Amino acid sequence: MDSKIDKILETDTSIRVYRLYSAIQIMPQLIKPEIESFYAQTSEENRLELGLGPLEFERNKELISRYLPKKKGVIIDVGGGPGVYSEWLAGLGHEVHLVDPVEKHIKQANKRSAKAKKSFKSILGESRKLELPDNFADVVILHGPLYHLQLKEDRIKSITEAKRVLKPNGVALGFAINHSASTIAGLLNGFIHVPELYAMCKEELTTGRHDPPKNMPGILPSAYYHRPLQLRDEFEEAGLVYVDTYAVEGMIWMDKNYFETRGDAKKKEAIMELLRITENDQALLSLSPHMMIAGKKAMIG
Ligand SMILES: C[S@@+](CC[C@H](N)C(=O)[O-])C[C@H]1O[C@@H](n2cnc3c(N)ncnc32)[C@H](O)[C@@H]1O
């Protein structure tokens, strides 16, 4: 055979083999199987409408708003799930790119975007390797990766990627679950004395690792729950300039009559005020199930 044709065929075959190999290699590595099956069994689409969800949604929008560009900006919603926040951000006039490793969420996000007044783009991808250019975004939101990635090196990789895609002066907003969250909930709800849950809480308090009992599906699978200062250390280690850490729900979710309070406009405003005046109180941060950290990319470096 002509050696030129031989070369083309050989290259063509190796490209195809390489692509197949990459697909096999990359797809299973995108996300742990237990995370995929957790989201297959639960509905992330209406999580923010149930229980403490409305408070989380209201507060996250309030906190994120403080860092949004005044004019139209580029926002990356990493771990954006079915796109509830992306829809809101696109509605404010921003160019939004959602990134999530769960196919079900990307399909839901695409549907949501098609129905929305302002559309947004969704990418099947993962926080440790964003398929986006350098110096591209005004704000990167990490809402998922910081607790879903159990290894520190993976979280640092994700924050470093966020920094890479940010424009100089751009802001990364990281959402984390507090290391004390399950324990406080367990003490309030009485499940702390269930031996497997007690062991889980003890591990979270001492190491940050969250590994739910095998016989209790429905609890978030293996994850990492931060101490407030650790979250700051990770942002700084990844090269971001620390701005602040905020309590998302603060301590108001512990109101004995929480749902009654939410239904009474005056009482609701009163506890929201308590939350706002303590949102940056470092001594109280661990009473909040979720925290948001803000870190800036320096103009140089
Ligand atoms: C609890 S959901 C939050 C979804 C959305 N941010 C919200 O608050 O409504 C966490 C999301 O993080 C995604 N996720 C998990 N690991 C991730 C990773 N390494 N990179 C990006 N997203 C990830 C999950 O697929 C899921 O959609």
Image (tube, rainbow, N blue to C red):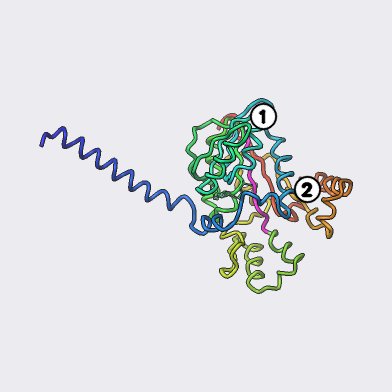
Q: Nearer the viewer, residue 232 or 196?
A: 196
Mark 2 or mark 1: whose residue is earlier in sequence: 1
Q: Position of residue 70 (x, y in %)?
A: 69, 27
* Residue located 78% across and 55% down the image: 253
In this rendering, does residue 238 appear at all?
Answer: no
Q: Position of residue 154 (x, y in %)?
A: 52, 50
Which numbered mark, 2 or 1, is in the foreground of this view? 1
Q: Position of residue 29 (x, y in %)?
A: 44, 52
In this rendering, does residue 243 appear at all?
Answer: yes
Question: Pointer 1: residues within 10 angstroms few (<14), some, or many (20+)?
Answer: some
* Residue located 10% across and 37% down the image: 1
Question: Pointer 2: residues within 10 angstroms few (<14), some, or many (20+)?
Answer: some
Q: Could you tell me which quadrant the C terminus lies in?
A: top right
* Residue located 71% across and 73% down the image: 193
Q: Is residue 33 left or right of residue 88?
A: left
Magenta: main secondary structure equals strand
Disc 2 target residue: 281
Outermost residue, top direction? 71
Mark 2 and mark 1: span between their CA atoms?
26 Å
| Amino acid type, label 2 | Asp
Find residue 226 and name its label.
none
Secondary structure under badge 1? loop
Residues shaded magenta: 169-179
Magenta highlight on residue 286: no
Q: Is residue 254 left or right of residue 133?
A: right
- Vertical placement of residue 59 versus 222, above or below: above
Quadrant housing residue 17: top left
Quadrant housing residue 208: bottom right
Find out whether the residues at labels 2 and 1 contact each other: C-beta distance under 8 Å: no
Disc 1 target residue: 69
Q: Position of residue 186 (x, y in %)?
A: 72, 65
